[in-house]
Amino acid sequence: MIKLQPYLLPVIALVATGISSPLFSQKTSVKDIDARVEALLVKMTLDEKIGQLHQVPGDISTGTDVAKDDLLTQIKAGKVGSILSHTNFDNKIAMQRAAVGTRLGIPLIFGFDVIHGYKTIFPIPLAQAASWDMGAIERAERIAAEEASADGQNWTFSPMVDVSRDPRWGRVMEGAGEDTYLASRVAVARVRGFQGDDLSKNNTLAACVKHFAGYGFAEAGRDYNTVDMSEQRLREIVLPPFKAAADAGCATLMNAFNVLNGVPASMDKHLLTDILRGEWGWKGMVVSDWNSFGETIIHGAATDEADASAKCLSAGSDMDMAGGTFQKGLKKALESGRVTQAQIDEAVRRVLRLKFSLGLFDDPFRYLDPKRRAATLEKPEYRLAARELAANSMVLLKNEGGLLPLRPDGPFKKIAIIGPLADSRSNKNYMSFWTLGLGDVSQYDTTKVVTPGMALKSSLEEAGFEVTITEICFNADCTEKDFSAALKATAAADLTIVCVGETGIDCGESRSVTDLNLKYNQEIIMKIAARGNMPTVMALFNSRPMTFQWASENIPAILVCWQPGFEAGNALADIITGAVNPSAKLPVTFPRSVGQVPIYYNALSTGRPQQQQGQMWTSGYLDSPTSPAYPFGFGLSYTTFSYSDIKLNKTKLRTGETLEVSVTVSNTGQHAGEEVVQLYIHDPAADIARPVKELKGFEKIKLDTYESKTVTFRLTEQDLGYWNHELKFKADPGKFKVFVGGNSRDVKEAGFEIVR
Ligand code: GLC
């Protein structure tokens, strides 16, 4: 006797009553999706079509009886095509049942911000980028997709691929940093992880590359602020990660909130039609950001909902997230002739095509199987993956005298762990704003976070160390008198680990800052720890590049931990004990001070580059060097690596040929380790000024002690080209420089030329 799952009853009922709607026929195959879309479209009323373009934020509290919500009423009336940010599984079943019970039974699609894990929380995206490990990033998204799809989500609003050079901007934590090439590689890894090889499988999610476009260049680093840039910079720096995601088959794309060169991105025909659908031939579905259609009115670029609807739809945007602008204005826009029925139908086609490709018409409850949910969420191996990626994301900036890793046979026996983030149980720490506000609290049970105190105490005591933990207040009222316990703890210790930084909600959307220094007198805590040259390790828990000039000059060991997620403490302990040799590299420049921002490695030379501070009549500052505190691509290991001179297979590159750039990397230290070998180029004589370096390749390699490996990169003219002032993409004949090294500053150099 097959026990019928209650949630399948409506589907069976529909089929049993002979409604042999094509919706529930044999499994949807890609090739007949268009035919089934057309077959459905012709049956739909205008209201049903507008309903499909309307996405409603689900009631994100758990336990609320959806039946009482007008949400259910709207769904039954065919007014809703998608729900976002809903975490209650049973509610999702009820909502889907309501949708399937409508006249045409069009299922809902459930969207959610799966940004760095779903139930098992991984390091923030910027941290993951610091691993430079595309396989690990893809695996992290695969796990996130397994969990989210098992919990009824079909669609994630990720990857965020906004390149940014401004750590004042809170959303720098959500992307892959300042470099276009790295951001493009990460974008592909994330799309592959989410979407797998078949969107109709019940363990894959539709991805959504965002925010299109230019959001990371908000003036003054202030979120949602104006973006103004040349088309040349847009095409060279901003668009390639979107193109990479689109080419990787990303199913959807999200508008940005900002104006780009005066035009709100949601109504930017040049972006959405000329480039995205025209030049790139992308056929996916575009969703607005939260009410970004309605905000075109606030931007002052639309008069009312009808005008906003007309401008956004005709520009190439399809679905209205959380704003209700289409609900209020699209019919009026049609009646007044500002949009055509054909334009509305095309947007509806894209929504229906997405739902068919997810298999939602074949089985609307495919992602709502309680058995799969129970068997999938928070598998132990998921936490292991999170721990491994968190450790491989932590960047070692300093390690004077080989202070780390702590060795049981070493000079230190008594370890004091102090600081506001030494053992915090607050749900704000080691995580991000994404794991707080959107889901209900049970969505991210932060009691599951392993704190530094927990992990370090158990792992170090197991190794024979004596460990004390002293938490310190973490707010603006903290003063030196609050630090007496820390003072005492460090006095009784041989070495101190100071856990400082920012909370997970000090950064992220709508969380820009004007000051990158450590807040709440944390520098005093470090001075206490390091007084009298006490051996001290600074463990920084940060979401963005921060400035800590005193620590850089006085603390012998500094580790950037980022916001590591659930396995924060275990990952830190793995690094501190040497169970994991740090291998991460900065995906963003760390400035000396906020006054240097924007500061990034792939800058132009200027006509007066400064060689040293104080050199007059050159591009520099009176009060600071122009160099950053730590450059892009930088990160130390517990071992050392040496690089041979670069070998080229040719020094003259002709059209159609491939340049091979080889270097032999040797592990010259006492620890096995991993090195991210980075390849940069420079075009010193082009039609326009070109960046002094541009990342064009990288490879993360493992080397045992004293082992060597030869790494070979391959470059073609396509890799050497750029968008010139006529907006043509081309590579110039003439000399080029090529650099290889373990970061963007300390490199070997060679030369070649393109000849015609
Ligand atoms: C937010 C964000 C966007 C997110 C959306 C849904 O405002 O800008 O990235 O996907 O709303 O939460």
Image (spheres, rainbow, N blue to C red):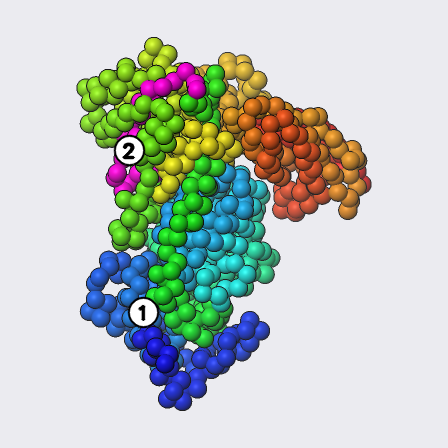
**Viewer-side residue, 389 vs 185:** 389
- Relative side of 746 to 477, left or right: right
Rendered position, 159 above or below 626: below
The tag on residue 651 is none
- Amino acid under label 1? Ile
The tag on residue 423 is 2
Rendered position, 496 above or below 157: above
> Residue at the spot x=75%, y=33% of the render?
648
What residue does disc 1 label?
A: 93
> Residue at the spot x=44%, y=23% of the render?
407
- The part of the chain drawn in magenta is 409-430
Residue 746 visible in this rendered orientation of the protein: no
Residue 330 figure quarter: bottom left
Rendered position, 630 above or below 47: above
- Amino acid under label 2? Asp
- C-alpha span from label 1 to label 2: 39 Å
**Residue 507 image offset from top left, x and y in percent:** 34, 39
- Residue 423 shown in magenta: yes
* Pointer 2 local density, CA inside 10 Å: few below 14, some 14–19, many at least 20: many
Which secondary structure type mostly characterizes the magenta part of the structure? loop
- Residue 515 shown in magenta: no
Q: Earlier in the sequence, mark 1 or mark 2?
A: 1
